[in-house]
Amino acid sequence: MALVTTSKIYEAIARVADMQAAGIKVASLTAGEPDFDTPEHVIAAATRAMREGDTHYTPVRGSLALREAVRQKFHQENGLAFSDDQTIVGTGSKQVIFNALAVTLQQGDEVLLPVPFWAAYTGMTYAAGGVPAFVQTSRDTGYKLTPEDLSAAITPRTRWLILNTPSNPAGVIYSESELEALGGVLRNFPDVFILSDEIYEHLHYTAERPKSLLSACPDLADRVLTVNGVSKAYAMTGWRLGFGSGPKDLIEAMANLQAQTTLGPSSVSQAAAVAALSGPRTSIDYMVDAYRQRRDLIVDMVDSHPLVNLQRPDGAFYALLDMAAVLRGSKQFGDHEAPDAAFCEWLLKDRHVAAVPGSVFGAPGTVRISFATDSATIEHGLGTMLKAVSEIE
Ligand code: PLP
């Protein structure tokens, strides 16, 4: 557990809250959650559930109604057919991911993480007794894992590959053919399981919806766990509701762990999630339109800056700004162990703009900004940051 450190992202968010409580106005670009409210019909369904007495323990894997809604979602949106015993609902997709690792990892087993990665994967891996094994990517490959690098990274200790598409923090979306190519490698390593984290599936700025790994590689069905949830697409982060579908034995082991620890998630959240998954799509379209406009604003602002590079994010609501060269060469930050962290610290203290250092995601020299906030905050916060970069000696 000594390897499980606190979440640097939540640390940054807490610092902003402290400064704001002290009367300092901070432009925060740290948020990992929609700045929209949960849709009204979802709240109505939750209220109704409470009034009608849906306030008791639920089955371990989640209520029958929600498991059915999840099955329908995977079938209709992703073309994936799962039986009921292949589905589990958890307290956020975080719990689903952690439980999967906890029931499969032996001490020292490796979990492959393409860099940059969502930081929580490393903490969960350590907590489950495993070791993260990082696979570098670069801006040249669009921050995507290549089949060659995947093949070279797999060892006899590799238990899992975690693939996140669309991704946090770079907004990367793997195309169907890229997923097929990775599947081609994985076919040669039958002991490696694949966790496909598709939590940002609906937040894409491409014409086509992102492909689910399993729909691109159906023959890997006996070792793919597909994870999703309602947090991001339906602005429901606080309801803590995620789900996963995969091989029956794996789901059963995860359910056994859940039975002895937390049981099924909140009954009210489950009722809300049924309404979200089976209700109208208008709120998603509305939010995605707003995110797209903000994404375009960021791309325009960064494009004209000579020292900061950005690969246009195709999905999720983050932009990973690459300023490695200027930070490394700078008088003020260059000597620090993590110049991006030193820069973000200074930016917060001196300029009152909060962003997350890329070293948190294994990408030193980059800075993650979130566009799950209004355009005025983005314009001011990012504008201040870009001006500060220009002034670095
Ligand atoms: N996966 C990724 C890549 C995320 O960025 C997040 C949240 O930030 C999650 C999963 C967790 O979402 P949930 O709210 O469902 O636990």
Image (cartoon, rainbow, N blue to C red):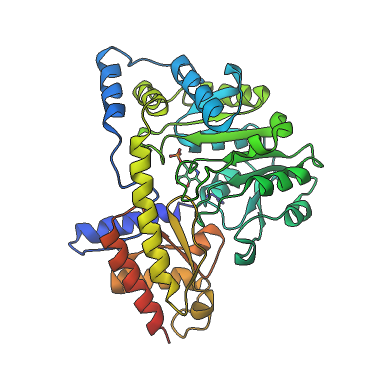
Answer with the quarter of the image where residue 345 lies.
bottom left
- Percent coordinates x, y for residue 385 in the rendering: 36, 72
Q: Is residue 38 visible?
A: yes
State whether residue 22 is above or below residue 195.
below
The residue shown at (53%, 58%) is: 361
Q: How many marks?
A: 0
Between 375 and 15, the residue placed more toward the observer is: 375
316 up-or-down from 339: above or below: above
Residue with the most extreme left position? 23
In the displayed image of the protein, which residue is found farthest to the top?
52
| Residue 40: image location, x then y, percent | 26, 31
Comparing 300 with 320, the one in front is 300
210 displayed left or right of 247 = left
The residue lying furthest to the front in this view is 207
Residue under the image location 79 percent in, 40 percent down: 187
Measuring 29% from the left and 59% from the top, which residue is drawn there? Answer: 375
| 17 vs 141, nearest the viewer | 141
Please tell me whether residue 135 is drawn above or below residue 185 in the rendered image. Answer: below
Q: Is residue 199 left or right of residue 21?
A: right
Quadrant, the C terminus? bottom left
In the displayed structure, 369 sits above or below 283; it is below
Quadrant in the rendering for residue 215: top right
In the figure, is residue 371 to the left or right of 189? left
Q: Is residue 238 visible?
A: no
Q: Residue at x 50, y 59 (%)?
A: 360
Query: In the image, residue 208 lies at what x, y percent?
Result: 53, 45
Counting from the top left corner in percent of width and height, residue 113 is at 63, 51
